[in-house]
Image: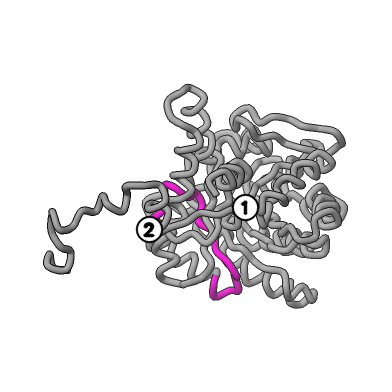
Amino acid sequence: MSHSILGKFPEVRLRRARRTKSLRRLTAETELSSSDLIYPVFIIEGKDKVEPVESMPGISRKSIDQLIKELTEVSDMGIPAIALFPVINNSKKTPDGIECTNPNGLVQSAIRVIKDKFPELMIITDVALDPYTTHGQDGIINDSNYVLNDETIEMLVRQALSHAAAGADIIAPSDMMDGRIGKIRNALEDANFKDVLLLAYSAKFASGFYGPFRDAIGSNKNLGEADKSTYQIAPSNTDEAVREVGFDIKEGADFVMIKPALPYLDIVKRVKDAYKIPTFAYQVSGEFSMIKAAANNGWLNEKDAAMESLLSIKRAGASAILTYFALDAAKWLKDIN
């Protein structure tokens, strides 16, 4: 682009369009709304239970009855979807995570109750074994602690079918096993769950930002010193991430997820540009907690930092953002508008 097209000073003064709040809103190239947000929630067994997550200020694990109270506000604020993450009692954890298939399990029960109370609220369910396994890995392991791909998929298929039967709208496999999207899609078709959507965690990186989430669901202690680098993507790799997304789309994914979000905005943009598919981004627990911690120490303004981070994710090309700030962000957006 030549300078003759761009113009020159003083004929061109770009600050003119920044002079007032109304002008800045009028010329905004990216807008964030409550419809862009997905609210992740942690559910626990029992009744009348609320357990604050120490490493995630303002976030709590809640029994289903207490969650229902919060979801009234979530629905009223125009947030279209929630994502369920279970906290499983240690007594129900096994090496193979078989509890994940229980038709009357915590997630399956929560789906039915929420759908009865809020039929229009979309429910996204996590398909992975880490909340259910004694070792904290996302799949079934062998004697060398290596996660077995094909054996894990068999369990994931059963888990996904149980969620669909309970009424889940969107099933989100986050395990990163090769080939699981195709197997789950075929199983859903065969069981006549043709309208259940698949949100594939296609580009899930072996990140250092997951710690608070693992605290929240209780898998940190089970995982111990082990990691998930044999199935999650190395932070150094972009082409591999784009390739993973392509495979999942070919296998039947309706949407794809990039996780984490802010450190991987380049991946969000590459995926959206390459495939033109609804591309979600997960602003993970560590991203949330670092803003909260800095704000609680008076080092930055929580609202400004949170909204800037969400806007940047949207600007990179995200179709929707899964974020623990969802409810607060919806309130802030309402105040702005």
Residue 231 seen from this side? no
Q: Height in image: 46 above or below 170?
A: above
Residue located at (31% from left, 53% from top): 17
- The amino acid sitting under disc 2 is Thr
The residue beneath circle 1 is 38
Task: Please say whether residue 324 is one of the residues in the magenta stretch.
Answer: no
Q: Judge the density around disc 1: few (<14), some (14-19), many (≥20) Cα neighbours within 10 Å.
A: many
Q: Position of residue 53 (x, y in %)?
A: 66, 31
Q: Measure how far apart labels 1 and 2 are at the Cα level.
A: 26 Å
- The amino acid sitting under disc 1 is Ile
- Rendered image quadrant of residue 254: bottom right
Looking at the image, residue 158 sits to the left or right of residue 270; the answer is: right
The segment highlighted magenta reads 249-267
Residue at disc 2, secondary structure: loop
Q: Which mark is in front, 1 or 2?
A: 2
- Sequence-first disc among 1 and 2: 2
Quadrant containing the N terminus in the rendered view: bottom left
Residue located at (80% from left, 41% from top): 69
Looking at the image, residue 27 sits to the left or right of residue 175; the answer is: left
The residue beneath circle 2 is 27
Q: Position of residue 191 (x, y in %)?
A: 79, 74
Identify the residue at the far top of this view.
Answer: 297
